[in-house]
Image (tube, rainbow, N blue to C red):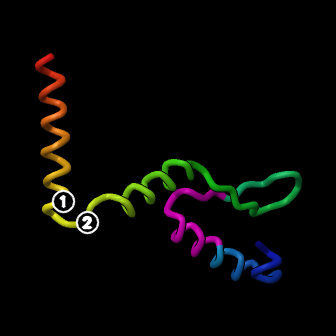
Amino acid sequence: MQELAGQNSTHTKSMQQLLLERHEGHLVFVFIAGRRNVACFKNMTSCIINDEWYQEHPHSIEDESYRISRSRSKTDSHADS
């Protein structure tokens, strides 16, 4: 990180803040093997799955309503069994 931001600690802190804002809690900075400010991602699997689902799911209200009613009918039919 310091290589990207230069040796100026103000730039390093600004870059850290921008990365933290961009990755919304999926990023932590740790001290590993004598190196400060090592960026590590956490819980990225759930982030990737959620992003994928939102990209693939229906975006229209009608499609979403159909999906919900279809799921409901499947749930109701399993409850009757």
Q: Residue furthest top?
A: 81
Across and down, in percent, residue 16 comes to 64, 71
CA distance for labels 2 and 1: 7 Å
Across and down, in percent, residue 30 comes to 72, 55
Decide if residue 71 is on the left or right side of residue 23: left
Crowd rating for badge 1 (residues with CA inside 10 Å; few <14, some 14–19, many 20+): few
Q: Examine the structure image and report whether residue 34 is included in the region drawn in magenta.
A: no
Q: Secondary structure at mark 2?
A: loop
Front residue of 3/55: it is: 55
Range of residues picked out in magenta: 16-28
Give the residue number, with chain letter if any, for mark 2: 59
Across and down, in percent, residue 54 comes to 36, 60
Mark 2 and mark 1 in contact? Answer it, CB < 8 Å. yes
Q: Is residue 21 above or below residue 77?
A: below
Name the residue located 18 percent from the left edge and 23 percent from the top edge. 78
Give the residue number, with chain letter if any, for mark 1: 63
| Rendered-image quadrant of the C terminus | top left
Name the residue located 65 percent from the left edge and 77 percent from the top edge. 15
Amino acid type of the residue that numbered disc 1 sits on in the rendered structure: Asp
Amino acid type of the residue that numbered disc 2 sits on in the rendered structure: His
Q: Is residue 55 above or below residue 14?
A: above
Q: Which secondary structure class fits the magenta region best?
A: helix
Name the residue located 44 percent from the left edge and 59 percent from the top edge. 51
